[in-house]
Image (cartoon, rainbow, N blue to C red):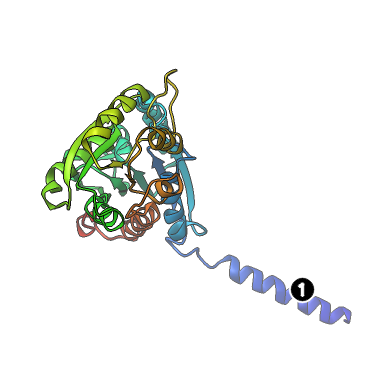
Amino acid sequence: MSRDKRCLFLMASIVVLCFFSNIPMIEGASNKIMVVMSYEEDNPWCIQIKEGIDSVLAGDNDIIYFHMDTKKNINGGVRKAEEAYELYKQFRPDGVIAADDNAQSMFVLPYLKDKVTTPVMFCAVNAQPEEYGYPASNVSGILERCFIRESIAFAKQLVPSIGTVGFLTKDSPAGRAIRKQVETEADTYLTEVAGFKLVRNIEETLAVLEAYQKTSDALFIRSTNGILDADGNSLDNQQVTKIIANSYKKPLIGANDFHVEYGVLCAVVKSGKAQGKIAAEFLLKAMNGTPINQIPIT
């Protein structure tokens, strides 16, 4: 290439660079998003929710995840929520997703609900939205409902002799919300309800299982993560399911795919990935200008 041609090429390159440097960034192409998870990073449910959120928002947005760890340490939740709020003030997100009930009661309600203009979308909430004052001026989202009726019907297809089903969950906001659901819809089940027990530790769990062995044909387990062992250590879903399966010698019914992986008979599963995906889609609408009152709770 001659000297003159090189000069012309260089001048043309400079013109092109100057032209593109003056093109404004597309507004809204990238947002800062904060996700507050009620539970631990390695919790299977949280992993599913993250997959759903990332399927919508990852790539074009700056996403930061904060885990409150309240399955393993519920007493530390308030302090974790304070840390989450400090991170919120530093990060200054364009939108927030808050997953599961503890993130609502400990984080969204005291710090964000009707106090900031940042749009907040919740997901995986078991309680009735009115308990949190939802919808709010800046809050909407998606509720989580367990497919209890469907799971019992599925279990009866596999074991037609099931006539009574007991329920066991950890004594937690999620567990108490499920108890309310059972109380509301029990008359639609294909079996009788043998009882609903909320437990805090493995000693209580074993006592409940011994009683259920005599009074129920099957056992529905849900939200058992965080039950304490004899030393006060938090057990995960897999550990608790294994203990229950070894102690209760009748069919077990679960609510998640990981319950089946851990050895329960069956489950009609709910999807954490769907919860996260829908919450992320709702948040995109809000950040793009759709008023919160036009994004109804689902």
Please state, as top left, top right, bottom left or bottom right, where the C terminus lies in the image: bottom left
Give 67 or 198, whichever is nearer the viewer: 198
Residue 90: image location, x then y, percent: 45, 37
**As drawn, which residue projects farthest toward the top?**
231
Tell me: residue 80, above or below residue 182.
Answer: above
Q: Which residue is mark 1?
A: 10
Please state, as top left, top right, bottom left or bottom right, where the N terminus lies in the image: bottom right
Q: Quadrant of residue 235?
A: top left
Residue 234: image location, x then y, percent: 43, 27
Mark 1 residue type: Leu
Does residue 195 appear left or right of residue 199 in this picture? Answer: left
For label 1, the crowd category at 10 Å Cα-Cα, with few meaning under 14, some 14 to 19 and many 20 or more, is: few
At a point 28% along the width and 41% down the height, the residue shown is: 219
**Element class at badge 1:** helix
Does residue 237 appear left or right of residue 162 in this picture? Answer: right
Tag count in the figure? Answer: 1
Residue 36: image location, x then y, percent: 39, 41
Residue 210: image location, x then y, percent: 29, 28
At a point 50% along the width and 63% down the height, the residue shown is: 25
